[in-house]
Amino acid sequence: MNKPKLGDEVLIHSYKHDGKIHRSWSKGLVLDANEDHTIVINVKTLVTEADGRVWCTREPAICYFPNHEWYNVICMIRNNGVYFYCNLASPSLWDGEAIKYIDYDLDLKVFPDCKYKVLDEEEYRQHQRKMHYPDELDIILRSQLEELIEMAKTSIGPFKHGFSEHWYHVYQEFKRKEK
């Protein structure tokens, strides 16, 4: 299987259903890659929006990209806890250049106290009409949203206590050995 290697710096590209670039990250350091997922960390990374606006990430973020699920999870490590931003998206793929996925607008934000909020439902409905998302896609995304909510409520997968901290420690060890 074609996958990035531990320590590779990779691009991350997010697209919309119509094939247009949505957002790109200038680099992500690969911490783990296997047949099921790729895990990268972004630290002070430049992000370019489709409209050309550029900004820099503020805190370290562990990015969990499953290869077979219709979502990805960004674990933002802040002083007051880990915040999770979940994109309902196509399964991620690595094409030798970048980790790529299609962003389907619906998002889930999970707070350190495990409370959550579904975001961008109106944007999803607008793009669903405009870009003609098939009914089967809507069923998949709604099901994956429910699965993410359940995972967050029960603290499993990337929401498991210590997940982000473990991968941040792996990053710190990697950087220490690099010196």
Image (cartoon, rainbow, N blue to C red):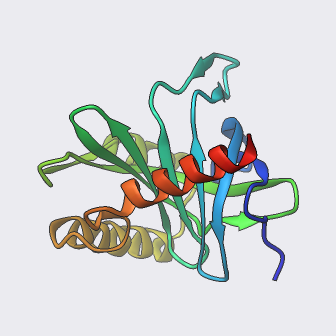
Q: Nearer the viewer, residue 104 or 148?
A: 148
- Rendered view: 163 above or below 98: below
**Where, quadrant-wise, is the N terminus in this rendering?**
bottom right
Q: Name the spot of residue 147 as percent of width and height, x first.
A: 30, 74
Q: Nearer the viewer, residue 131 or 114?
A: 114
Q: Is residue 133 visible?
A: yes
Instruction: Give the residue displayed 20% in from the left and 45% down from the top.
Output: 111
The number of callouts visible is 0
Q: Name the spot of residue 89 as percent of width and height, x first.
A: 52, 60
Residue 92 is left or right of residue 78, and the answer is right
Residue 102 is left or right of residue 140, and the answer is right
Q: Is residue 128 visible?
A: no
Q: Name the spot of residue 34 as percent of width and height, x first.
A: 66, 78
The quarter of the picture where residue 36 lies is: bottom right
- Rendered view: 162 above or below 67: above
Q: Nearer the viewer, residue 22 or 65?
A: 65
Q: Nearer the viewer, residue 67 or 81?
A: 81
Residue 120 is left or right of residue 16, and the answer is left
Q: Name the spot of residue 96 as percent of width and height, x first.
A: 88, 61
Instruction: Give the residue displayed 33% in from the left and 75% down from the top.
Output: 143
Instruction: Give the residue displayed 74% in from the left and 46% down from the top.
Output: 178
